[in-house]
Image (spheres, rainbow, N blue to C red):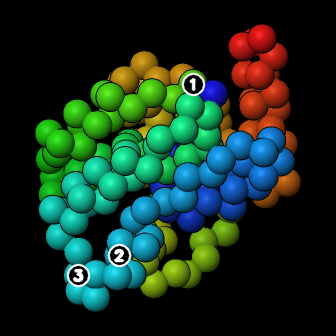
Amino acid sequence: MKIAFTGPECSGKSTTSKALAQQFHIPWVREHAREHLVQLGREYTPDDIIIIAQKQFALWKENTFVADTEMLVCSIWYEEKTGKRSDEIEALLREQEFDIYLLCQPDIPWEFDELRENPDDRERLFEIYKSRLEEHSLPYILIKGDMKERFTIAAETVQDLVKNNH
């Protein structure tokens, strides 16, 4: 069982994915972008986004895990920065395999973080995530509400997956 969290920044992906992994005793795969950007010590470039995507993809070694992020995040980030899609990231997006994508709606308050860039643009970005999931025919569930509601929706989704896979 492979579960991916996706959506715009500051929409609860990290908090909810980590709690879900702990609840179900499933390995949690962190978001590589954060540690990469902190270590850079300079402004990132489009090439850095490709490197981040490749390193994130390489972290997915287990047969069962919860991923804090996935290639759609890198693809949309790259496209927002350059106005075009990256062939390398799009290839990884086509190659990644998740049983379900948990699309996090940005209906929780924005929290400042020096790595976050889009405090006023989250709804527009959310619509891009939703349309790209549909464009690729990827199965997704909407995660919204306060953090307790988000966790409940995510946990019920995992329970349904487990039930349907046995």
Image spot of residue 54 (x, y percent): 28, 50
Residues tagged 1 and 2 counted as in contact (Cβ below 8 A): no
Is residue 112 shown above or below 25? below
| Residue 35 visible, this angle | yes
Q: Nearer the viewer, residue 47 or 64?
A: 64
Separation of marks 1 and 3 at Cα, in angstroms: 35 Å
Per the rendering, the mark at residue 37 is 2
The residue to which callout 3 is attached is 43
Quadrant of residue 129 within the rendered picture: top left
Which label number is shown at residue 99? 1
In the image, which is nearer the foreground, mark 1 or mark 3?
1
Q: Which residue is drawn at 78% across and 45% down?
A: 25
Q: Crowding near pointer 2: few (<14 within 10 Å), some, many (20+)?
A: some
Locate residue 49 relative to residue 56 in the image: left or right. left
Report the amino acid beneath label 1: Asp
Q: Vertically, is 64 above or below 139?
A: below
Q: Which of the image's four quarters has the C terminus?
A: top right
The mark nearer the N terminus, 1 or 3, is 3
> Mark on residue 157?
none
Distance, label 2 to label 3, CA atoms, is 8 Å
Task: Residue 35: give x, y in percent of width and height.
Answer: 43, 73
